[in-house]
Image (spheres, grey):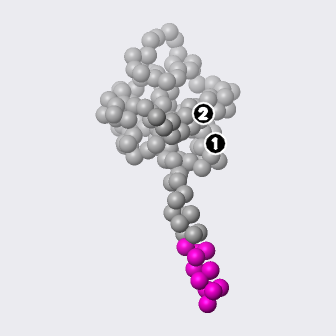
């Protein structure tokens, strides 16, 4: 009888421990269809998954971005600065999700000399595959900072 009670106590404690485990942090990685951006997102996905994050990858296009920032703990978007501007659908998405701006990291690539007319966190020159590992590590570090719980007052 004592062994049965002890077993039930252990099962109960194990169940409580599992219930108290923090849920995985959800990260959205959205990219425009280019080889460079796909490699960048794949490198970031691998690193974030190794750190216990649940990663969702989506392509975005002129049809828009079908995700809500509020559904994720962090969002990374990479887009091409074609015609010297951030893609209009990204600008529209950022406006629609502005309440969640603190959890969004926006990267744009650009060629030429133009001023980015949107709040972006990182701008790189035209896509260079040689930069993928360095950029992925930098952006993952920034995402980890977004995911870190705020310090208690």
What's the magenta bit mostly, secondary-structure-wise?
helix
Q: Considering the image in quadrants, where does the N terminus appear?
A: bottom right
Residue that carries the numbered disc 2 in the rendered image: 141
Mark 2 and mark 1 residues within 8 Å of each other at the beta carbon: no
Q: Tell me if residue 38 can be seen.
A: no
Displayed quadrant of residue 65? top left
Q: Nearer the viewer, residue 124 or 112?
A: 124
In the image, is residue 84 above or below residue 64?
above
Q: What stretch is highlighted in magenta?
A: 1-12
Secondary structure at numbered mark 2: helix
Closer to the eye: label 2 or 1: 2
Q: Which of 33 and 117 is in front in this view?
A: 117
Secondary structure at numbered mark 1: helix
* 85 falls in the magenta region: no
Q: Which of 58 and 19 is in front in this view?
A: 19
Residue at horizontal 46%, vertical 23%? 120
Residue at horizontal 31%, vertical 34%? 96
In the image, is residue 8 above or below residue 90?
below
Pointer 1: residues within 10 angstroms few (<14), some, or many (20+)? some
Instruction: Give how far across and how far down residue 147 sits, in percent.
Output: 52, 40
Furthest-bottom residue in this view? 1
In the image, is residue 14 above or below residue 104?
below
Residue that carries the numbered disc 1 in the rendered image: 47
Residue at horizontal 53%, vertical 66%? 16
Instruction: Give how far across and how far down residue 5 sits, in percent.
Output: 59, 83
Distance, label 2 to label 1, CA atoms, is: 10 Å
Instruction: Give how far across and how far down residue 71 sits, in percent.
Output: 40, 46
In the image, is residue 109 above or below residue 103?
above
Instruction: Give how far across and how far down residue 152 sits, in percent.
Output: 48, 37
Displayed quadrant of residue 93? top left
Q: Nearer the viewer, residue 98 or 66?
A: 98
């Amino acid at each position: 009888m004592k062994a049965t009670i002890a077993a039930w106590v252990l099962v109960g404690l194990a169940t409580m421990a599992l219930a108290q485990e923090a849920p995985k942090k959800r990260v959205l990685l959205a990219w425009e269809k280019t080889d460079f951006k796909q490699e960048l997102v794949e490198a970031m996905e691998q690193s974030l998954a190794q750190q216990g994050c649940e990663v969702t990858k989506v392509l975005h296009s002129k049809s828009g971005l079908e995700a809500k920032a509020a559904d994720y703990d962090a969002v990374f978007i990479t887009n091409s600065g074609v015609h010297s501007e951030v893609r209009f659908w990204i600008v529209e998405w950022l406006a629609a999700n502005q309440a969640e701006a603190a959890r969004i990291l926006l990267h744009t690539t650009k060629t030429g000399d133009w001023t980015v007319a949107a709040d972006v966190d990182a701008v790189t020159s035209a896509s260079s595959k040689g930069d993928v590992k360095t950029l992925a590590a930098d952006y993952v570090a920034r995402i980890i900072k977004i995911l870190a719980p705020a310090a208690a007052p």
